[in-house]
Structures are given as C-alpha cells and as structure tokens.
Image (spheres, grey):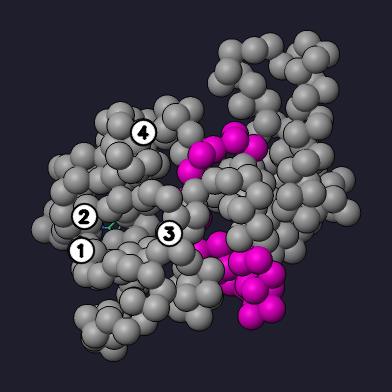
C-alpha cells in the first residue's frame, strides 16, 4: 500500500479536463516532483490533494483512507500539509509569532489546552526548532511583511512544517527567486525532508533543479501523467521532450 494513491482522479472545469484520469502513487521516495508545461494541471492536482477543490471523479487514498472531497482542515489533520500563501501569513506579526500560532494550531488539533504551561513550553521549543530548520533564527523578531521575498517563502514552509505533517506539498517554492537563492532554497528543502523524514510532493518549473533534487518524477501534460520514473529515466523520455517542445 502506498502512502498516497489516486485512482482515475479527474477534475473538469466546464469542457476542460484539467486533471484527466490521474493515477499517482506516492511511496518510499522522499521527494516526488510533478513537472509539466504551463496549464498542465499541476496546481489543480495539488488543490485536489489538499481539499481546496473537489474532484469530479476518482479516488484519493491516504494511508488507506479515502480523503477525496474532505475540507482542507481535515486533510491537514490527517497529516498532509501544503505551503501557505503569503496571504495566509499574519503580516503584522513577527516570524516567531507566526510560527507559534501555527504550532498552537497543531496542539488544538490534538485537543490539548495550549495555555497550560507544559504545552506552552513545548510550543516555544518547537518554534525555536522551526526557526533553525528554516534558517530564520536571525530574523525571528522581524515582521513577516518586512521579510524579503525569499525569506517569506521560507516562513511559508515553516508554517507548513509546524503542523508536523507526514507529507508536504510545495507548489513552486522557488518562484520569483534568482538562481542562487533558488539553489539555497532547494538545499533547505532537501535537508528538511531528510532530517524530518517526511515525504514531499514538489511542483517546480526549473528542470535543472528538479533533476538534481528529485527521487522520482511524474510528468503531467494536458491533465494526464505521460511519464514517470527516476530523473535519469525522465531525462531520456521522448514523450517528455515532445511535451516540452510542443508548448
Ligand atoms: P499548472 O499549474 O500546471 O500550470 P493549472 O492546474 O493551474 O496548471 O491549470 C490547468 C488548467 O485548468 C489550465 O487550463 C487552467 O486555465 C485551468 N484552470 C485552473 N483553475 C481553474 C478554475 N478555477 N476554473 C477554470 N479553469 C481553471
Ligand atoms: Mg501551477
């Protein structure tokens, strides 16, 4: 049994099959990337997996439980987290405060009272650990809206980690970053996945980065998975090359 498995998953927008009979299996691999041309359906697939969109058909099984159509909150509770958007950050609060709130949300999910001193200590310890994990210790007391673009992305990942997921989904975490910053970000992501022993599904448009960081790659084109394999296998796949050149 795979950790996450979709069966004939689809999402139609009117006439458009944005996600078209996708059978995806996320298993042992630490980092499983989803690549494909613009409009291929990558983000839509993420929205289905995280409860932001309802599928028009098919199944999503996570740890052998059907999660298709569950609301985002329930899916987070089951252990699947996604990077927050900038808009989800409390912009007037500091980096540390944002992480505390997200960590407390986890405690509430576990039904404990975060106001008691024991769990408050735990919250503070976890927050410190998160700050280290996302390399923002020095910026702990800076307001989220004063961070650079790259540091905001790191904070978004920190918030996603705060709920202690088993599986995390990141949609283009290096978007808008320069080359050097992207490489740093990818190193950070790789380290987090290895250290925390979590699984990651990654959408990333920079093919060079994808080839270096991924353990496994699925290629989406017009809503369908047209290839799947190791980075080496994907690089040599003719259908993949055609799909990219065809756009
Ligand atoms: P990708 O992330 O691979 O670039 P998307 O999943 O964002 O692709 O989009 C896949 C297709 O679905 C595109 O043609 C897009 O225009 C369409 N689409 C995405 N979201 C919606 C929506 N909410 N309503 C209608 N069409 C949508
Ligand atoms: Mg997208």
Residue 22's label in the rendered image is 2
* Disc 3 + disc 2, Cβ < 8 Å: no
Circle 1 or circle 3, nearest the eye: 3
Judging by the rendered image, the residue that carries numbered circle 4 is 63
* Disc 4 + disc 1, Cβ < 8 Å: no
First of labels 4, 1 by sequence position: 4
Quadrant holding the C terminus: bottom left
Q: Secondary structure at mark 1?
A: strand
Gap between marks 3 and 2 measured at Cα: 15 Å
Q: Secondary structure at mark 3?
A: strand
Query: Residue 120 at what x, y percent from top left?
Result: 79, 20
Residue pictured at 32% horizontal, 84% vertical: 236
Q: Is residue 142 visible?
A: no
Query: Residue 24 at what x, y percent from top left?
Result: 27, 53
Residue pictured at 68% horizontal, 26% vertical: 104
Gap between marks 4 and 1 measured at Cα: 24 Å
Q: Is residue 98 left or right of residue 22?
A: right
First of labels 3, 4 by sequence position: 3
Q: Secondary structure at mark 4?
A: loop
First of labels 2, 4 by sequence position: 2
Residue 224's label in the rendered image is 1
Q: Nearer the viewer, residue 1 or 45?
A: 1
Residue pictured at 73% horizontal, 50% vertical: 133
Region of the chain picked out in magenta, as a range: 162-187
**In which quarter of the view is residue 178 placed?**
bottom right
Query: Residue 183 at what x, y percent from top left?
Result: 64, 74
Judging by the rendered image, the residue that carries numbered circle 3 is 32
* Disc 3 + disc 4, Cβ < 8 Å: no
**In which quarter of the view is residue 49 placed?**
top left
Q: Is residue 206 above or below residue 169?
A: below
């Amino acid at each position: 049994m795979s950790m996450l498995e979709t069966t004939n998953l689809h999402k139609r927008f009117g006439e458009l099959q944005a996600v078209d009979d996708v059978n995806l299996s996320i298993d042992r691999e630490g980092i499983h990337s989803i690549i494909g041309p613009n409009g291929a359906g990558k983000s839509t697939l993420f929205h289905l997996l995280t409860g932001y969109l309802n599928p028009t058909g098919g199944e999503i099984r996570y740890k052998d439980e059907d999660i298709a159509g569950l609301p985002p909150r329930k899916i987070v509770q089951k252990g699947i987290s996604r990077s927050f958007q900038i808009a989800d950050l409390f912009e007037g609060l500091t980096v540390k405060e944002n992480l505390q709130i997200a960590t407390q949300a986890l405690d509430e999910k576990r039904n404990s009272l975060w106001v008691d001193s024991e769990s408050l200590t735990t919250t503070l310890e976890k927050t410190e650990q998160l700050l280290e994990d996302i390399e923002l210790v020095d910026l702990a007391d800076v307001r989220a809206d004063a961070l650079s673009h790259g540091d905001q992305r790191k904070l978004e990942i920190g918030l996603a980690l705060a709920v202690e997921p088993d599986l995390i989904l990141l949609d283009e975490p290096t978007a808008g970053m320069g080359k050097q910053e992207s490489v740093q970000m990818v190193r950070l992501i790789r380290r987090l996945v290895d250290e925390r022993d979590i699984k990651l599904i990654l959408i990333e448009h920079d093919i060079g980065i994808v080839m270096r960081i991924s353990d496994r790659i699925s290629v989406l084109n017009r809503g369908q998975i047209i290839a799947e394999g190791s980075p080496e296998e994907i690089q040599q796949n003719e259908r993949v090359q055609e799909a990219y050149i065809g756009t």
